[in-house]
Amino acid sequence: MKKSTRNAFTMKTANMREIISILRQGPVSRADLARATGLTRAAVTIIVERLVKNGLVTERGTGESRQGKKPILLDIVSSGLCFMGVDITRVDCSIGVVDIKGKILAHDTFRLSPDGSFDDLLLRVVSGLRSLRATLPDPGSLLGMGVSVPGPVDSNTGNVLNPPNFGMLCGRNVLEPLKDALGCGVWIDNNAAARALYEKDLGAGRSFTNFISMIVDTGVGSGLVLGGRLFRGLGFAGEAGHMSVDMNGKLCTCGNRGCLELYAAIPALIRRECAGRPDIAGWSDVVDRAAEGDALCLSVIEKEARYLSQSVVNTTNLLDLEAVILTGFVTYKPGLLLDAMSRFVQGARIAAGAHRLEILASGSIEHVGVVSAAMLAAERFLTGETDWDISG
């Protein structure tokens, strides 16, 4: 292909990706697409016709008009642009096929055996994904796969380093075996970074350009969005769970002392603070008892808020963020925790007098781990980092 022809092709697909990126937020008219992209109405019409011809976009209803004819709205066809997602946790592995709007099209979950091997895990993942792919009307609509794992993980090489309490993945490379077995682009990141991508594009982070998403469950992780893009640094950015909150504290598996994860991860918190209380097995028990006035559980929520807030204050003083979005176990009836965190953070933050920092909990999303993993691949598609062969 000649250089000028290649440049024209690249520009055409870039414009298509931009239009798809806008449409994934909801139905939009041709006129609004022209305004949002800066393209002419004629150029938008040509691109939309090609996307409609290829079964990726459809007309869906009409919008409001102040005068004259109501505009026809365009929307993405659900099954036209799909991505596989693999979410590996210490307890189970979820796999699925997800459309570009985050809708689950096919899904499966299996539990991990404490005695299972890494090779067994890969075999189950590959077999399961092949089965799910076979259920799609058009396997050619699959444009890549994202994999989320507990960090730390090198997102460039696919090497999982030393996730605490997860020997099955320690020192393993997840990326290359899946690329070889499934023959598509594969990207990997820690589960908190994947969740930050989901929040940025489809969740609570859509209103913010700079925020941190913190996942608090069996561990503590985070993903940073700066300037509207996931910030990875050299591949390991966003590990708030390994920010020290006690320089003389316990030794962490990462080599640091007093890491936030040692204190704020829910199992560790409950073992330490709720010993002798057999009625408290998880975070939801703490919250429910606290709502009834249980003094111990109220103090546990305050302590959790303090641990998380210390990390948040350090991060926001450094980066001057707009928002903190909590995900994971702590989104269960989060009012008490959010109130306590807001009180602690706003009182200690350097920029508190200049602007407010929003601290909020993400909504409950079914199969969010798989959807977030798939967004790792969707991001690469929308930013033009993957090849896309579209006819016409």
Image: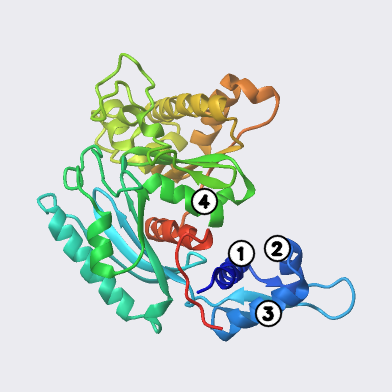
The residue that label 2 is drawn on is: 37
**Sequence-first disc among 3 and 1:** 1
Report crowding for label 3: few under 14, some 14 to 19, many 20 or more residues within 10 A (C-alpha). few
Helix or strand or loop: what does disc 3 sit on? helix
**Sequence-first disc among 2 and 3:** 2
Label of residue 46 in the image: 3
Circles 1 and 2, Cβ within 8 Å, touching? The answer is: yes
- In the image, what residue type sits under mark 4? Glu
Circles 3 and 1, Cβ within 8 Å, touching? The answer is: no
Furthest residue toward top = 248
The residue that label 1 is drawn on is: 18
Q: Nearer the viewer, mark 4 or mark 3?
A: 3
Q: Quadrant of residue 83?
A: bottom left
- In the image, what residue type sits under mark 1? Glu
- In the image, what residue type sits under mark 2? Thr
Helix or strand or loop: what does disc 4 sit on? helix
The residue that label 4 is drawn on is: 199
Residue 5, given in percent of the width and then of the height, sits at: 57, 73
C-alpha distance separating marks 2 and 4: 23 Å
**Of residues 77 and 237, the one drawn nearer to the viewer in this rendering:** 237
C-alpha distance separating marks 3 and 1: 14 Å
**Sequence-first disc among 1 and 4:** 1
Furthest residue toward right = 67
Q: Nearer the viewer, mark 2 or mark 4?
A: 2
Name the quadrant of the C terminus: bottom right
**Sequence-first disc among 1 and 2:** 1
Q: Is residue 346 left or right of residue 147?
A: right
**Sequence-first disc among 2 and 4:** 2
